[in-house]
Image (spheres, rainbow, N blue to C red):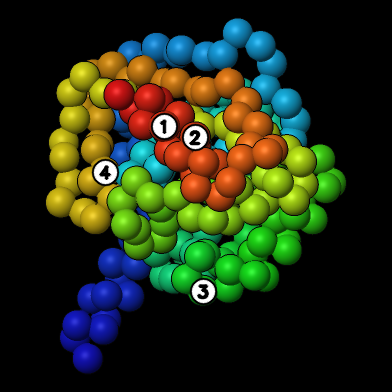
Amino acid sequence: MKNKILKKIAQKLSPFFISSLQHFIYTTCKKVYELPSGEIPFPAIWVCWHGQLLMCPYLYRKMRPLPMNGSAIVSEHTHGDIAIKASKRFKFNYIRGSSRKGAVKALVQAMNVLKKGEDIAITPDGPIGPVYSISDGVSALALKCGVPVVAFGYALNSFWQLKSWDKARVPKPFSTITYRISGPLYLNGLTKEQANEKVKTALMRCMS
């Protein structure tokens, strides 16, 4: 009983703690931006690694400031609930589901969002890995809707390495975050394996 109570308290406090830490780190860090020369088409499928979720929302909002709409696919797990509550300041819309649970429903909703002319954001190795893997949903969405994929992420000069499955790195306050965005990646004419490799290569370059 005591453990259940403590778990509920932790779940309620986690979003506030994560949001506060995220904002403090972003505010104190120096930001460097390495952006593509041309404009990013709208809509697009934005992808980042699960381990870079902490600071990537700021980059998205820099490129797509409000009132531009964007929807993120978030797992139906409790961790998804925490992530949604922690990222309220970015005013994203959310689609619940993942490659492991609610995949078909999430893909249908994502296609409808793209057809309305709004972005979709996906962590292709979420919600539980394997780390740096690409789910087939990314290429399926891109090919079905005829929209490009945009890889985004960041490199750090000083960080704490977490022992989580996604190898998340937390920037140290007052360090430098080098944000990177790929140019639009068009997957037309590629096999599933080729498309996944193209997206993975772009994502790895963003964090290198």
User: What residue does disc 1 label?
Assistant: 201
Residue at x-position 50% and y-position 23% = 181
Q: Quadrant of the N terminus?
A: bottom left
Mark sitting earlier along the chain (3/2): 3
Q: Nearer the viewer, mark 2 or mark 4?
A: 2
Q: Are marks 1 and 2 in contact (CB under 8 Å)?
A: yes
Q: Are marks 3 and 4 in contact (CB under 8 Å)?
A: no
Q: Quadrant of the C terminus?
A: top left
Q: Secondary structure at mark 1?
A: helix
Amino acid residing under circle 4? Ala
User: What residue does disc 4 label?
Assistant: 168
Q: Secondary structure at mark 3?
A: loop
Relative to 146, is 140 above or below? below
Q: Tell me: 145 left or right of 105.
A: right
User: What residue does disc 2 label?
Assistant: 198
Residue at x-position 66% and y-position 11% = 38
Mark sitting earlier along the chain (3/1): 3
Amino acid residing under circle 2? Lys
Amino acid residing under circle 1? Thr
Give percent across and percent down for residue 163: 15, 51
Give percent across and percent down for residue 25: 31, 29
User: What residue does disc 3 label?
Assistant: 101
Mark sitting earlier along the chain (4/1): 4
In space, the residues marked 3 and 1 are separated at their CA atoms by: 26 Å
In space, the residues marked 2 and 4 are separated at their CA atoms by: 22 Å
Crowd around label 3: few <14 · some 14–19 · many ≥20 (10 Å): some
Amino acid residing under circle 3? Lys
Q: Tell me: 202 left or right of 114.
A: left
